[in-house]
Amino acid sequence: MRHYIIGHVENGHTYLNMQVEGAAPHEISNRLINKSVECLHIHKRDDLSSCWRVLIEFGSGEMLEVSASETEVVDWNEIGTINLAFRPGGVPVDAAIYKRLAVDPFVVNEVELLTCTEDLVFSECGILLKGLAGEIFIVAIGEMPFQLSVSLHSSNNLFLPRYPVESCAASKPPGASLIKHDPCTTPSPLTD
C-alpha cells in the first residue's frame, strides 16, 4: 500500500479514503461481522497506545492488518488515514518481529469507520468494532505520523488518537449490506 493517499475533491472538500487490500470497500462489514476477535499482534517494541501496525486475528485464522498513511494537505500539515488489509488464514505471524496480545474474545456485531475533518479535508482515520455484549475495540490514527493507537474493552491501556474519537463522525462502511449476529437465528442481511 502507498504511504500517502491521493484524495478526491468534491464540493470544495478533499476526501482521503482508506486503502483496502484483499476486499472491496463495500465488503468490509460483511468480512468482519460475526467474526470472533481472538488476539492481536503488534511489533515487539510497540504498545497499544503507539504502534506501527496492528494484526487482528479472528477465530477462523484470518487476519485484518491495520496500518496508517499520511498525506500533506496544507503547509506541512499531514492528515492520517487508516489502511486495511485482509489476510487469509494459515499465514504465520513472524514471532521474531511481532508479539501476541491476548484479548477477551468477542464476536463482531457492528463495524463503523471514524472520519475526522481538518482544514476542509475528510479522512477515514479509524475503525471501530462493536461486540454483542457492548465490547468496543478501536484502532485509530495515533499522535505521530504513521502511528496507530488502540482502545480495547479488556485493557486499561493509554489511548492516544490524533483526533479525539468524540470529534470524529462514525459511519457504516460504504455500500455495506450489514449483517448483525443474532445467536438465536441464522444471520440475515438488514435493509436500511
Image: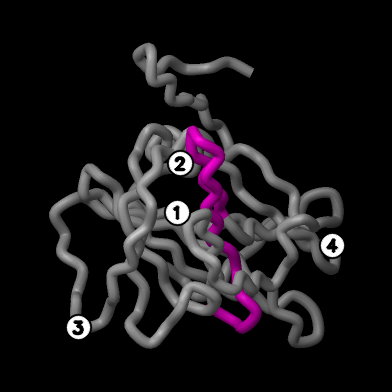
Circle 4 residue: 120
The amino acid on which the numbered mark 2 sits, given as a three-letter code, is Ile
| Disc nearest the viewer among 3 and 2 | 3
Quarter in which the C terminus is drawn: top right
| Disc nearest the viewer among 2 and 1 | 2
Q: Do the residues labelled 4 and 1 touch (CB within 8 Å)?
A: no
| Disc nearest the viewer among 4 and 3 | 3
Among the two numbered marks 1 and 3 on one chain, the one whose residue lies closer to the N terminus: 1
Q: Do the residues labelled 3 and 2 touch (CB within 8 Å)?
A: no
| Disc 3 to disc 2, C-alpha distance | 30 Å
The amino acid on which the numbered mark 3 sits, given as a three-letter code, is Ala
Q: Using a 10 Å C-alpha cutoff, classify the residue at mark 2 as few (fewer than 14 neighbours), some (14 to 19) or many (20 or more).
A: many
Circle 1 residue: 20
What residue lies at 74% left-to-right and 59% top-to-bottom? 116
Q: Which mark is residue 96?
A: 3
Circle 2 residue: 28
Query: What segment is highlighted magenta in the picture?
Result: 127-146
Among the two numbered marks 3 and 2 on one chain, the one whose residue lies closer to the N terminus: 2
What residue lies at 22% left-to-right and 43% top-to-bottom? 60
Return the residue found at the far top.
Answer: 185
